[in-house]
Amino acid sequence: MESYSHFPQLSNSQLDLSKFQDAQLMKIKPNRGKGYTSGNSCTTEVVIDNKPTKLSLDPGAFCCCVDEAEISLHLSNKQENELSSLLYNHTEAFTSDKEPLGATIGHDVDITLNIDRPYPPLLRRPAYPASPKSREALEIHITELLDLGVIRKVGHNEEVEITTPVIVAWHNGKYRMVWDLRALNTYTVPDKYPIPKIQIALTQISQAVYITTMDALEGFHQNVVSPRAWKYLRIIVHCGVHEFLRMPFGIKNAPSHFQKMMNEI
């Protein structure tokens, strides 16, 4: 995280971990939460309740803003300090919306069909009809996926043999884009890699002293699709054909591939 000082440094190697509440430091998000720093200190400014406030921070300090609700209330101050130091030592594991989406290396997603060309009409579907409201939602989501590098637009001179239509599902005013992969999954050779049972996973952590959960940002989309499989993962909407460069939700072997990748890394 970026940090800087407007004032002379006040060195204190014995300084304990400090924290400030409801602070917005530089451009760090979320805007409200806890900030932590450790080590030698210098005086700088943060914004607390929309007012600049002088605080003692590390020169070039790493500052972690954490939602209060996400940290157990049962942790002591010492344990909170240890947690903050752990986050500091593994900053490369975290990302922001300004950084490119990560990708696993050496675990490309591949797809094998159990039929040969020419492919049946069931795999060459036109775009589903969509209302103006749904079309607008589709365009927004397609743009988001393009910006993330999850999909790319198929050129007009490229041969297209397989297309999957897209559905826009609405619930309480919010939409979700769903690709109808039933036909593709019907002709996909299954990967029978075993998925561990939840009972076994719970047994493995039964003696743990600390338990935490983390969610991979766009977890499925961090799995790269093999270039030879791009042609199978093409979706069609009113604004054209796009193909997935990262693993989408809903393909037949996605759970098996993700589990295999997790076991190997």
Image (cartoon, rainbow, N blue to C red):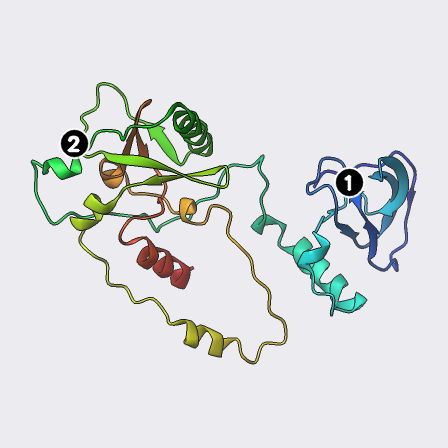
Residue drawn at point x = 67 percent, y = 60 percent: 86
Q: Is residue 52 above or below residue 248?
A: above
Q: Which x, y percent locates residue 223?
A: 38, 47
The quadrant of the picture occupied by the C terminus is bottom left
Q: What amino acid is labelled 2 in the image?
A: Glu
First along the sequence among labels 1 and 2: 1
Q: Which residue is mark 1?
A: 24
| 203 to the left or right of 91 | left
Judge from the rendering whether residue 5 lies leftward or rightward of residue 253; answer left or right: right
Q: Residue most toward the top?
A: 156
Q: Nearer the viewer, residue 242 or 2?
A: 242
Circle 2 packing at 10 Å, graded few (<14), some (14-19), many (20+), is some
Label of residue 161 in the image: 2
Q: Amino acid at mark 1?
A: Gln
Measured from the top left, where is residue 164 in percent x and y? 25, 36
> What SS does tag 1 mark?
strand
**What separation in Å lies between label 1 and label 2 (alpha carbons)?**
51 Å
